[in-house]
């Protein structure tokens, strides 16, 4: 078992080519999605057991920006931010676990009789979002949180149990470790991700173009994108990857990991009519499929609020 000190985790740690290759091999072998919490724990466990990674780093172009941070109730948070938390997993034993997640929203809530802003976080491996109350810097609540995390980190970091050591290292140095890992995987075209799940692009299910066309038509008609509660996560990922590959049909108004799709609408110069449109006042045909629009037609379609429903991008 290797002994890696503060200097290694703070200054020398990096994600290697071999690290990413091993992640690929595992996903390919198991045919299952995997989350960043699991990957990070495997990676840190490997460093503890086997020591320095001699394979070249894949992060030569990384700026070092921490895209994932340890939860701080006094910190500034935005939707899409990566977060690391120490979450209670056993009340009787006062045992905490280490989890990576993502900020997905904000809401008002009451904490100790006071209305405060709560940050909603979706943690890896947890079915429902968890909310954390914000607190002013230097306030008793903020100080108590920091003291609790410090105690948890020290207990785990000094433990003889390797899994507890792993948790302690990620809680203490995870801003760099997990940020570097996520950056490396996002930069590697072999990986695709959705809602905290990671998989390989090469083994995603195939999505027929007709299915993407149908989704686009539903969005144009004002229907929401298909609910995916009953869809296998890999199929859901494949659909989102296909939508992202069609910028002329879809615009992502959400985050990269939790996209929300709107139909892309061509400008009049880019558009061709997709279906007949009739004027409800004159009963005259406004436009016909396969034709381009003139300014008067565009104006009338916009007045009727049906422009986006009757046009598509010209091939």
Image (cartoon, grey):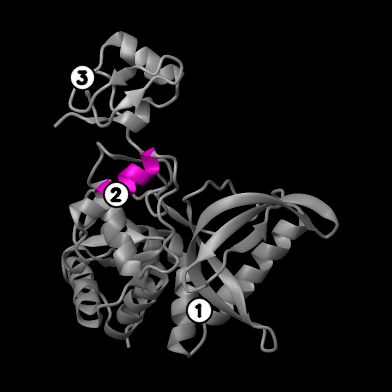
Residue under label 3, please give it: 292
Residue under label 1, please give it: 157
Can residue 7 be seen here? The reply is no
Using the numbered discs, state the Cα–Cα distance from disc 2 to disc 3 in whole angstroms.
23 Å
For numbered disc 1, what is the local secondary structure? helix
Label 1 Cα crowd, 10 Å radius (few <14 / some 14-19 / many 20+): many
Occupied quadrant, residue 111: bottom right
Task: Determine if the magenta segment contains residue 179.
Answer: no
Quadrant (top left, top right, bottom left, bottom right) of the C terminus:
top left
Residue under label 2, please give it: 214
Give the magenta-colored segment's residue range: 213-220
Say which label, 2 or 1, has the lower sequence index.
1
Where residue 2 sits in the image (x, y, percent)? Answer: 32, 83
Can residue 103 be seen here? The reply is yes
Residue lying at 20% horizontally and 59% vertically, measured from the top left? 58
Using the numbered discs, state the Cα–Cα distance from disc 3 to disc 1 in whole angstroms.
67 Å
- Per the picture, the main secondary structure of the magenta-coloured stretch is helix
Where residue 228 sits in the image (x, y, percent)? Answer: 41, 62
Query: Toward the viewer: 272 or 204?
Result: 272
Say which label, 2 or 3, has the lower sequence index.
2
Task: Determine if the magenta segment contains residue 218.
Answer: yes
Residue lying at 28% horizontally and 63% vertically, measured from the top left? 14
């Amino acid at each position: 078992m290797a002994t890696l000190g503060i200097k290694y985790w703070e200054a020398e740690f990096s994600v290697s080519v071999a690290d990413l290759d091993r992640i690929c091999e595992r996903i390919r072998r198991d045919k299952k999605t995997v989350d960043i919490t699991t990957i990070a724990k495997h990676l840190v466990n490997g460093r503890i057991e086997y020591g320095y990674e001699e394979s070249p780093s894949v992060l030569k172009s990384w700026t070092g920006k921490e895209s994932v941070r340890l939860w701080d109730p006094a910190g500034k948070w935005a939707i899409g931010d990566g977060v690391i938390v120490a979450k209670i997993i056993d009340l009787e034993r006062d045992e905490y676990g280490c989890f990576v997640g993502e900020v997905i929203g904000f809401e008002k809530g009451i904490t100790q009789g006071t209305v405060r802003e709560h940050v909603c976080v979706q943690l890896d491996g947890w079915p429902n979002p968890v909310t954390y109350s914000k607190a002013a810097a230097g306030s008793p609540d903020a100080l108590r949180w920091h003291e609790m995390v410090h105690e948890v980190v020290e207990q785990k970091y000094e433990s003889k149990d390797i899994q507890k050591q792993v948790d302690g290292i990620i809680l203490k140095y995870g801003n760099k470790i997990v940020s570097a890992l996520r950056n490396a995987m996002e930069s590697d075209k072999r990986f695709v991700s959705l809602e905290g799940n990671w998989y390989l692009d090469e083994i995603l299910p195939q999505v027929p173009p007709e299915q993407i066309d149908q989704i686009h038509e539903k969005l144009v008609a004002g229907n929401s994108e298909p609910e995916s509660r009953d869809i296998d996560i890999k199929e859901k990922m494949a659909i989102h990857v296909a939508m992202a590959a069609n910028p002329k049909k879809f615009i992502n108004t959400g985050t990269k990991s939790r996209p929300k799709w709107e139909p892309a609408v061509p400008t009049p110069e880019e558009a061709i009519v997709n279906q007949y449109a009739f004027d409800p006042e004159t009963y005259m045909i406004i436009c016909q499929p396969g034709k381009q629009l003139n300014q008067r037609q565009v104006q009338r379609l916009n007045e009727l609020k049906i422009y986006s429903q009757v046009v598509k991008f010209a091939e």
